[in-house]
Image: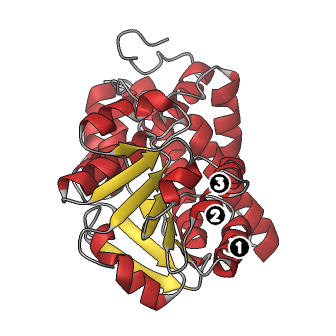
Amino acid sequence: MSAGATLAFVGLGAMGSRMVKRLLGAGHRVRGWNRTRARMEPLAAAGMVAADSPRAAAEGAEVVLSSIADTAALREVGYGREGVLAGLGRGAIWVEMSTVSPAATRELAREAETRGATLLDAPVSGSVGTVEQGQLSIYVGGDRAAFERVRPYLQALGPTISHVGPVGAAVTMKIAINLNGAVQLVAFAEAVLLAERAGIGRAAAVEAILQSVMASGMLRYRGPFVLAMPPEPWFNIALMQKDVELALELGRQARVPLPTTAIAHEMLSAARALGLGDEDCAAVFDVLAAMCGAPASAKPKGGP
């Protein structure tokens, strides 16, 4: 990649918008697009050039990055007259960072290749706070030479960047990792509520668990949400269920039983039935709380 290369970024949600801020802060030129135009305005004020379509964002960019909610949305922004593929130039690299179907990722990679471009799948491990600190872990699948060319840009987002295999391997690894989050949150909720119903204060129970050897990095930053939810979801219930469904689909294909993942899926379905789909995934706690008659987690002001 040349010095001063133009980057494109498609998908400016909670994660994508913060990744763009990191790239701008590292001195890169970024042209971005998002379906909801209001998401582009604060980034444009920070120096991003707003594009009118995914195609317009990709045209002339040496590297296109994308962070999209799900497989259907990725297909929508990837294909068609105004999609990313239509704007990719020969030699361009598309770094696809979403957690989506590995099969869909490989299909897009084949389409990019017919245009003389290369697609890498590069999902991230971390959340809003992690990307703000530039501490994401990034897994990359696809052509190794292309990976080395984009590494300097990915380093603005996180220090841990691992090439894990051919295209599709990284998003497969991400799905396997992500199922742990749902399972851990359900187990954490059970532990907190068991302690609370046995006479231990909720805050004391949360503190004790998060100081124990059982606390993962994810639990340490998301566990306190059962005491007070964040004003903006870091990763909502609906998105977590999407990831769990991807894991269950892969489990069926690989003939790997995923019993605890299946239980977590049912808890997420219950959360959505209770109207919690747009809340942070830590709100799965509220499902178990409702089942045992305990108070729900504290909601931010203005929340439901």
> What residue type is disc 3 on?
Gly
Q: Residues within 10 Å of mark 3 (few under 14, many from 20)?
A: many
Q: Quadrant of the N terminus?
A: bottom left
Q: Is residue 273 left or right of residue 96?
A: right
> What residue type is disc 2 on?
Leu
Q: Is residue 14 above or below residue 177?
A: above
Q: Helix, strand, or loop for circle 3?
A: loop
Q: Are marks 1 and 2 in contact (CB under 8 Å)?
A: yes
Residue 288: image location, x then y, percent: 57, 29
Q: Helix, strand, or loop for circle 1?
A: helix
How far apart are the alpha carbons under marks 1 and 3? 12 Å
Which residue is labeled 1 in the image? 111
Q: Are marks 1 and 3 in contact (CB under 8 Å)?
A: no
Considering depth in this image, is 13 or 235 the residue closer to the camera?
13
Q: Are marks 2 and 3 in contact (CB under 8 Å)?
A: yes
Considering depth in this image, is 66 or 252 the residue closer to the camera?
66
Regarding residue 148, the answer to whether it shows in the image is yes
Residue at the outermost bottom position: 145
Residue shown at the point (35%, 45%) measured from the top left: 49
Q: Residues within 10 Å of mark 2 (few under 14, many from 20)?
A: many
Q: Quadrant of residue 4?
A: bottom left
Which residue is labeled 2 in the image? 85
Disc nearer the start of the sequence (1/3)? 3
Which residue is labeled 3 in the image? 83
